[in-house]
Image (cartoon, rainbow, N blue to C red):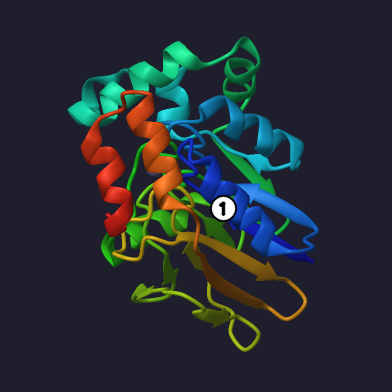
Amino acid sequence: MRIAVISDVHSNLAALEAVLADLGAVDALWCLGDSVGYGPEPNACTARLEQAGALAVAGNHDRAAIGRLAIEDFNPLAAAAVRWTAEQLTPRSRQYLAALPERRAEGQWTLVHGSPRVPVLEYLFSPAAAAESFAHFATRFCLVGHTHVPIAFAGGRRVAAEYMGADATLSWAEDERRYILNPGSVGQPRDQDPRAAYLVLDTERCQATWRRVEYSIAATQALMAQRGLPRPLAERLSHGW
Ligand code: ZN
């Protein structure tokens, strides 16, 4: 099976379309949450994900946008974008977001937004945080988003972390280790590479490949300006931060 894994689309339709065009034929499309928030096209993004048959889980922005997570813990810019998103959502988008589960298990794979321990909220940046997580999922692999940084954590006596930039690959053909993999963010990358990020799993070849795709950042920024979204949120897209 060839599976595309995306996360943190954040209402950035131009980035999502670029990724969908790039990934080619896949047997499944998995989405690790935060489909809305920050960006200018929340309804178009949820509709596109639905149309593409994405199997998705809920992120903190998805929950906040439908009033199921308090925005007190969001920074002021993120909170402003959540409020704007909540006003825009159509009943259909709200229904779509409300139906997203916190966690899914698909064969050898567990899907969550943040971590398997605290699915919607916990950030996995460090090997120490990842080490705590391995006890909280039963499958061999766990897929997480939330940090917007593409990374692979390999389990074992000591957890190893590796940043996975453009075209990085990981093979599990020759080992028995367990892994936590983060595809990076489609709509708001935070690893200094502004291109949209996603991950392709090839279950026959036991290989994961991290991909980056150019998209029209200017088009998304123009829409954000038009819609009155906070300027720093648009500017950061140019810097991949
Ligand atoms: Zn996010």
The residue drawn where x is 51% and y is 40% is 33
The residue drawn where x is 49% and y is 61% is 197
Is residue 107 in sight in this rendering? yes
**Percent from the top left, x then y, of residue 91?**
62, 10
Q: Between 90 and 2, which is closer to the camera in this rendering? A: 90
* Picture layout, residue 239 above or below residue 221: below
User: Residue flagged by tag 1: what amino acid is it?
Assistant: Ile
The N terminus lies in which quarter of the figure? Answer: bottom right
The residue drawn where x is 46% and y is 75% is 166
**Percent from the top left, x then y, of residue 133?**
40, 54
Q: Between 238 and 132, which is closer to the camera in this rendering? A: 238
**Percent from the top left, x then y, of residue 48?**
67, 36
The C terminus lies in which quarter of the figure? Answer: bottom left
Label 1 lies in ligand 1 vicinity (Cβ under 8 Å): no
Ligand 1: give its quadrant.
Answer: top left
* Picture layout, residue 50 above or below residue 5: above
Q: Between 211 and 33, which is closer to the camera in this rendering? A: 211
The residue drawn where x is 66% and y is 68% is 201
Is residue 183 in sight in this rendering? no
**Percent from the top left, x then y, of residue 191?**
31, 63
Q: Give residue 200's quadrant in the image.
A: bottom right
Number of dots carrying numbers: 1
* Left or right: 136 in relation to 54: left
**Residue found at the very far bottom of the displayed protein:** 174
> Which residue in the protein does label 1 denote?
6
Dot 1: what SS?
strand
Mark 1 residue crowding within 10 angstroms, few (<14) / some (14–19) / many (20+):
many
